[in-house]
Amino acid sequence: MSQSTTQTAQGIPQEIERFNITFRIQHILMFTTFLLLSFTGWGLKYAHEPQGVASWWIRVWGGAETAGLIHRVAGLTMLADFIWHVIYLAYLFATKQMTINLKTTVIPLPKDIFDIIKNYLYFLGLSKEKAMYGKYSYAQKFDYWAVFWGMFIIGFSGFALAFPMLITPIVPKFVSGWIWEVLSIMHSDEALLAIVFILFWHFYNEHLKPENFPMSWLWITGRMSIDTLKHHHPIEYEMLFPEEAKTEKKH
Amino acid sequence: MPYKKRLHAFAPLLLLSCFLIPVSGFAQQQESANCLACHSSMKGRIKTTGGAVIELQVNAERFAGSVHAALACTDCHMKYADNPHTSPSGAVPQPVLAIASKISAKHPVDPVAAAACAKCHPDIYAKVLDSVHGRNITDRRQTDGALCIDCHGSAHYIVPVKNPQAKMSRKHQVETCGACHGDKKIIEKYKLEENVMDSFQESFHGRKLHLGHTRAPVCASCHGAHDIKTKNDPTSPVFGNNRLQTCGKCHKGANEKFIPAITHKRPGPIPHYTEKGLMLLVIGVFAFIISHVLLEAFSDIRDAIFKKGREE
């Protein structure tokens, strides 16, 4: 990702751009459609229990027809957003605006496994050191790839369930006896996983954690202060500002 | 006539209770009011010598609110034209009598009244008698199968199907059919599909219906109503490729790969194990994220208290 930086008098910027406007818009589209899909889908998944609650909840969303329409429109928007993201990434790679660097990549690496083990040991008081991250911690990588998993499993199955006649031409005859059941199981179970994942993982890491409460404003500004960068992404900081990092270490 | 005998056995009881209320003379043509004078205040049930249990009470208020309120009692209970009815002797049209003899096993007390629906609804009654429900009663002489009042409720209180109170309304139809199709004894006896109620409730159709979707299907939307067939009957709307049309009523362009989507059968092994596999994944991920979040939060609290392991 391009790192446009505002230089200060000292030669080191006060903050760096972490997500450009395109990524920010993609994220906003992703979470608004995610919330709409969760709210309307929950009512359908738990339509019968507890008694009457789902019926009331769906009425809040304008009744079953309207909630269904919201769900479909939000789902298509999310899919479009995902496709836009993938095409945009391809464009960034093609134009060399983005290259793979092990310190900044969001691709999972063996280091992430070691980071997880290190942190668990720290949590349990068995180690005095927390893991040090590059541009993305394993928590952030998990967050990112969870969306990919969700889009493939929930997004595809949702599209198939919403527009069955469009996909029947590519459905082989021998799977048609069970594929619809499998699609609805995939959609429903993985949606539950996605919702709980966001509720625990994303909400804790990006909202409830003392250092982020009530939220990290990065999703609007796209910018991260150098202090935060130094503190939470030391490996990236070292890579971006090797001189400063060196002199600071000497102190 | 066997009815005559049976009625003789309990008629004195009726007579006794009627003495409590002044009744007008023994006119040939009885008005509903005359019958209701006794029957609206009578309480409880009576067992005939034949073993059938009949409800004595007719709720006058509910009867007045039904679609049949304008009918006289004797329009259906044709045989009981005398008052009080000592001998079933009224004249009965031949078509009704023919039906009555076919359904007498199901309605032993007053088969004529149960057949009388055909006076006004002859086409529908003919369809019913030809359906799997009807044949069960006429050919197999079963008593626990469905006929008019089993689905629509008593003819005394029947309301339009658009009225949510109706037993066949969108609101109540599924539970009405479920009274038999969710009944273990009946399912076993007739070898019916055993997971009908649960599979419908679990399906998108059932969920949407429950949530108030106005176009979600009820039982009759797919299976038909009065002319209902078994699923093995080639003329059934849910038999084989007949579903192309049936599903196509709502799902434009329904094709052979789409129609197996809805079934009342239990999920096969592939969906079953897909679900098990996905649940395993879900539980695995939950275990990781919940333990991570909780442990991290505790370690933050620990660090805040003991200032241990903190950067300066």
Image: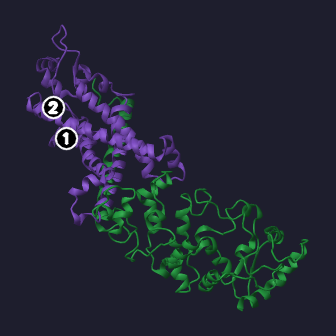
Chain B is shown in which shade? Answer: green
Element at badge 1?
helix
Q: Position of residue B200 (x, y in %)?
A: 44, 63
Q: Amino acid at mark 1?
A: Asp
Disc assigned to residue A167: none
Q: Which residue is mark 2?
A: A104
Image quadrant where one finds the N terminus of chain A: top left
Q: Is residue B130 above or below residue A46?
A: below
Q: Position of residue B203 (x, y in %)?
A: 41, 59
Q: Which chain is purple?
A: A
Q: Which residue is mark 1?
A: A112
Q: Quadrant of residue B11?
A: bottom right
What residue lies at 34% left-to-right and 57% top-to-bottom?
A185
Q: Position of residue A234 (x, y in %)?
A: 19, 27
Q: Position of residue A2 (x, y in %)?
A: 15, 24
Element at badge 2?
loop
Q: Chain of mark 2?
A: A
Distance Cα–Cα, label 2 vs label 1: 13 Å
Q: Amino acid at mark 2?
A: Thr
Looking at the image, can residue B299 be seen? no
Residues A38 and A213: in front is A38
Which comes before the other along the chain, label 2 or label 1? 2
Q: Is residue A77 left or right of residue A46?
A: left
What residue lies at 50% left-to-right and 68% top-to-bottom?
B225
